[in-house]
Image: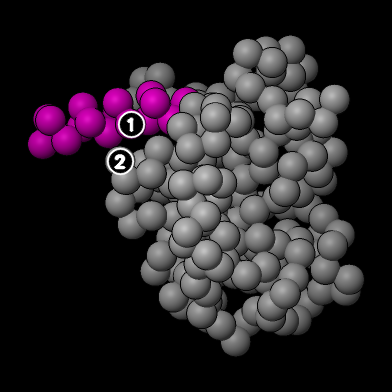
Amino acid sequence: MSGLEPALAALARGEIILLTGDRLRGGDVDLVAAASLVRPETINFMARYARGLICLAITPDRAVRLGLTLLDTGTLARTGRPFAPSIEAREGITTGISAADRAMTIQVATSATASAQDIVSPGHVFPLIASSGGVAARPSATEAAVELCRMAGVGDAAVICAVMKDDGNTARAGDLGPFLIEHGMESADIGELIDAKDRDRQKS
């Protein structure tokens, strides 16, 4: 896991990392943070610098506990985004759209005791339900973000947001060297994660 260790350490510190190599979305890149450590500043940074849709990647088990199901399984191959209905925390928020409110919704939805009674729909946080087979089944940002958070020891849910360029087009890995330097951000690649997990399986 040596190539992934800086990114895993950053996630464990509550920092945001850059995730590349999504094979279902033409190589789009995402910002990723551990949902268990999310703060309003995390959400604000993603909204300001990534500018894509801020989503909550969760496991199928957590989706069941929250009463969430996929909106349309037929679109997965096209969009690479396994959306469930948008959510809001039932209590403790105001308008729902502020960085603080979205962070609160994520904290509520990913708490150890979270259930369907703790959230309402529609809302301003967009859940994504990861495949139970992980990146081996779907080599996409949703699954990779969940697995990276598990490996970092910070739970089984992640906040992810696609990165857009100044011209409004989605960014690619080659566009973001200056971005990584400017923000001192670590990065991970989905292909590297898949290779690392394959090596682990061969050793066991």
Q: Which mark is residue 14?
A: none
Query: Who is closer to the viewer here, 170 or 118?
Result: 170
Query: Please, what is the three-letter code of the amino acid marked with disc 2?
Result: Ala
Q: Horizontally, is 100 left or right of 61 in the view?
A: right
Q: Horizontally, is 126 left or right of 76 in the view?
A: right
Q: Earlier in the sequence, mark 1 or mark 2?
A: 2
Quadrant of the snapshot with the N terminus:
top left
Query: Who is closer to the viewer here, 64 or 153?
Result: 64
Q: Is residue 47 above or below residue 89?
A: above
Check whether the beta carbons of the residues at disc 1 and disc 2 lie within 8 A of each other.
Answer: yes
Q: Position of residue 105 (x, y in %)?
A: 70, 67
Q: Is residue 75 above or below residue 24?
A: below
What colour-coding does the image apply?
one colour
**Whether residue 35 can be seen here:** no
Q: Give the residue at mark 2.
A: 136
Q: Give the residue at mark 1.
A: 194
Give the residue displayed 32% in from the left and 45% down from the top. Answer: 137
Report if residue 18 lies within the magenta region. Answer: no
Query: Please, what is the three-letter code of the amino acid marked with disc 1?
Result: Ile
SS at circle 2? helix
Which residues fall within the magenta stretch?
189-204
